[in-house]
Image (cartoon, rainbow, N blue to C red):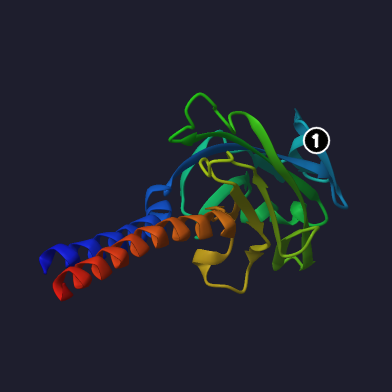
C-alpha cells in the first residue's frame, strides 16, 4: 500500500514545488543608480551649480533664488542602490533626493526635475549574459507645485505614478524589473514636525511575474507527473483484483 501512496504523493509534491519555486528562488537583488537634475526654474529662481548630461537630457544640479543666492536646492543623484526584488511584490526603493532646508524650500515651487534610472546588474547574473549592466531603464519628469509657502507637492507629468521596466532574459531570470516613482508631499508646515520636510524621491521596485503561459507550462508539467501517479494506482488495483 505504501508503494502506491508514494506514487501519488510524490507527483503532487512536485506540482507544489514547481509552482512555488519560481517565487521562492527568484527573490534576489537588482542594483541601479540614478541621475537627478533640475530642468527648469520657477519664478524668482535660476538654474546653476554643475551641469548634468545623460542619455535623454541635460540640466543643472542646483536651483538658486534670484534675490538670495544662499537660498538654494541641490539635486542629489543616487550613486548606487541594491534592493531585493520579488515577483509581483512592490518593495520600497529610493531614486535620489534634494538637499534643502525649511528656510529655502520655497525655491522649489514651479521648478521641474528629471530622474533618469540606470540598471547596473542583477544577482545572480545570467550565465554568460550580464543583462541589465549599464542599460538605460527610464526617465521621469516632475514639477514642484505649491498653493502657498506652507505646502509643496512633487507631481509627475504622467500622473500620480510613473513606471518603466527593463526586459529580462527569455528564461525568466533576470526578470523584467519594474521601477515605479510616486507623487509625494515635499513640505507641509501644518503637519507634525517629523513630516515637515521630505526630501527623498520615493518609489518601489518589483520583479514582474513570469508570463501566464510559462506558469501554465509548469503546471502542465506537474500535471503529467500526477497522471503518472494515477496510472500507477490503477495498475496496483488491477494487480490486486487478479
Q: Is residue 3 left or right of residue 118?
A: left
Residue sitting at x 77%, y 65%: 146
In the rendered view, tell whether residue 17 sits above or below residue 95.
Answer: below
Residue sitting at x 28%, y 61%: 13
Task: Estimate the x, y position of residue 211 in percent, counting from the top left.
Answer: 58, 55
Point out the residue furthest to the right here. 43
Instruction: Out of 239 and 111, give the one closest to the viewer.
Output: 239
Q: Quadrant of the N terminus?
A: bottom left
Task: Estimate the x, y position of residue 47 in percent, counting from the top left.
Answer: 82, 38
Give the structural element (helix, strand or loop) at label 1.
loop
Point out the residue furthest to the top here. 128
Which residue is under mark 1?
Answer: 56
In the rendered view, tell whether residue 112 sits above or below residue 50.
Answer: below
In the rendered view, tell whether residue 27 sits above or below residue 219.
Answer: above
Residue 199 in sight from this viewpoint: no
Q: Mark 1: give few (<14), some (14-19) or many (20+) Cα within 10 Å.
A: few
Residue 145 in sight from this viewpoint: yes
In the rendered view, tell whether residue 103 sits above or below residue 237.
Answer: above
Instruction: Out of 143 and 49, give the one closest to the viewer.
Output: 143
The answer to which image quadrant residue 29 occupies is top left
Task: Estimate the x, y position of residue 186 in percent, counting from the top left.
Answer: 65, 60
Residue sitting at x 62%, y 74%: 190
Number of marks drawn: 1
Point out the residue furthest to the left here. 2
Instruction: Out of 72 and 161, give the one closest to the viewer.
Output: 161
Instruction: Out of 7 and 110, give the one closest to the viewer.
Output: 7
Q: Quadrant of the C terminus?
A: bottom left
Task: Estimate the x, y position of residue 122 in percent, counting from the top left.
Answer: 50, 36
Amino acid at each position: 500500500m505504501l508503494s502506491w501512496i508514494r506514487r501519488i504523493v510524490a507527483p503532487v509534491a512536485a506540482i507544489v514545488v514547481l509552482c512555488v519555486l519560481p517565487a521562492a528562488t527568484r527573490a534576489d537583488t537588482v542594483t541601479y543608480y540614478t541621475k537627478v537634475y533640475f530642468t527648469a526654474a520657477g519664478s524668482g529662481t535660476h538654474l546653476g551649480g554643475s551641469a548634468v548630461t545623460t542619455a535623454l537630457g541635460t540640466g543643472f544640479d542646483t536651483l538658486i533664488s534670484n534675490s538670495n543666492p544662499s537660498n538654494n536646492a541641490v539635486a542629489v543623484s543616487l550613486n548606487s542602490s541594491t534592493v531585493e526584488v520579488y515577483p509581483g511584490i512592490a518593495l520600497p526603493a529610493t531614486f535620489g533626493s534634494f538637499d534643502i532646508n525649511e528656510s529655502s524650500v520655497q525655491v522649489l515651487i514651479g521648478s521641474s526635475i528629471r530622474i533618469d534610472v540606470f540598471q547596473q546588474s542583477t544577482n545572480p547574473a545570467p550565465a554568460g549574459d550580464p543583462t541589465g549592466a549599464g542599460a538605460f531603464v527610464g526617465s521621469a519628469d516632475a514639477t514642484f507645485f505649491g498653493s502657498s509657502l506652507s505646502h509643496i507637492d512633487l507631481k509627475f507629468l504622467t500622473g500620480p505614478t510613473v513606471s518603466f521596466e527593463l526586459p529580462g532574459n527569455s528564461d525568466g531570470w533576470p526578470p523584467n524589473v519594474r521601477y515605479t516613482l510616486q507623487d509625494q508631499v515635499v513640505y507641509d508646515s501644518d503637519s507634525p514636525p517629523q513630516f515637515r520636510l521630505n526630501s527623498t524621491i520615493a518609489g518601489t521596485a518589483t520583479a514582474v511575474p513570469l508570463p501566464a503561459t510559462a506558469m501554465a507550462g509548469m503546471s502542465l508539467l506537474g500535471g503529467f507527473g500526477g497522471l503518472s501517479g494515477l496510472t500507477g494506482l490503477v495498475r496496483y488495483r488491477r494487480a490486486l483484483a487478479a
